[in-house]
Amino acid sequence: MDVVGFGHIDAYVNAWTYRALQNAAVMLKKCGQNRLAAECRVSAEAIKASYGPTLINPATGWVAGWKSRDGQLHDYAFLWVNGVACAFGLLDVSLARKALENLETLRKKVNRYSYFGVPANLLPIDRKDHMAGKEGLLPTFECYTDGSVGACFSPYYLRALSIYGLKAEAKELAENLLQAFADGVFHGGWLTGREFKGWEGMDCGYEGTFGPSFAVLYAIAVEKKIIAAPVPEWWPPED
């Protein structure tokens, strides 16, 4: 996320790299590039094997945002990071469920209603980890890149909730988001800032209509059984 100081061992980047390598392995095999396909598969499995031990915060049970070079975990309860990590299968089932259960316990304490989507993070980001602070601006929790709510943070988190058995939470999130889309909450003219909301619904973005906000419609459609998720869901089958 821009203006947030993700660095060194980045949980979000590694989750997407894992998915990219899984996709590449299948596509390269289809193209007859078996050696390179095998290398992608080995690299993907290496990421998966080290992901949880490296990035799960033992104090919280969920995935931290990143581990800096000094070995410190930077953990602000990032829902969008844990969403991809769990949805893409980087954690064992028991660990993924524990991460989501613990996040949901915290979310229900601090931000229960999900009409505007889920927060980017449930805990305020320390000023040292927020680039706005380096420019003399104080980051404001619950606003913009420090914990605002939005549909764009929700697609993989919604799928993860459903995949790992948190059915009631997934159903509630899907229904609330669907109503918000019907109400036109997530789009507006240029510079209206409607893509991000404060926790009480104040517009606090800068674009207005934000393409990634609409990705959650896939997860909603799966949850509402309008479509079925493909198997495997995040990369093509080998056969």
Image (tube, grey):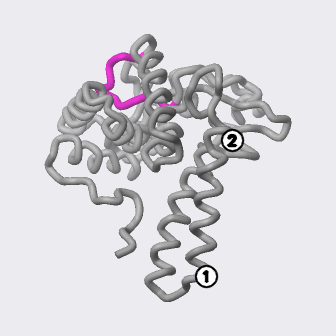
Judged by its main secondary structure, the magenta piece is loop
Looking at the rendered image, the disc whose residue lies closer to the viewer, 1 or 2, is 1
Query: Is residue 84 found inside the magenta-colored segment of the image?
Result: no
Q: Return the residue nearer the eye: 159 or 94.
A: 94
What percent of the width, then of the height, locates residue 101? 43, 23
Q: Return the residue nearer the eye: 221 or 127.
A: 221
Image quarter where the N terminus lies is top right
Left or right: 56 with respect to 203? right
- For the residues labelled 1 and 2, the Cα–Cα distance comes to 33 Å
The residues colored magenta run: 111-120
Amino acid type indicated by mark 1 = Arg
Left or right: 13 with respect to 72? left
Residue found at x 59% / y 60%: 44
Residue at label 1? 35
Residue found at x 35% / y 38%: 158
What percent of the width, then of the height, locates residue 183? 20, 34
Residue 6's label in the rendered image is: 2
Tell me, yes or no, if residue 203 can be seen here: yes
Left or right: 40 with respect to 172? right
What percent of the width, then of the height, locates residue 155? 37, 43
Residue found at x 43% / y 34%: 196
Left or right: 181 with respect to 98? left
The first of marks 1 and 2 along the sequence is 2
Query: Is residue 119 found inside the magenta-colored segment of the image?
Result: yes
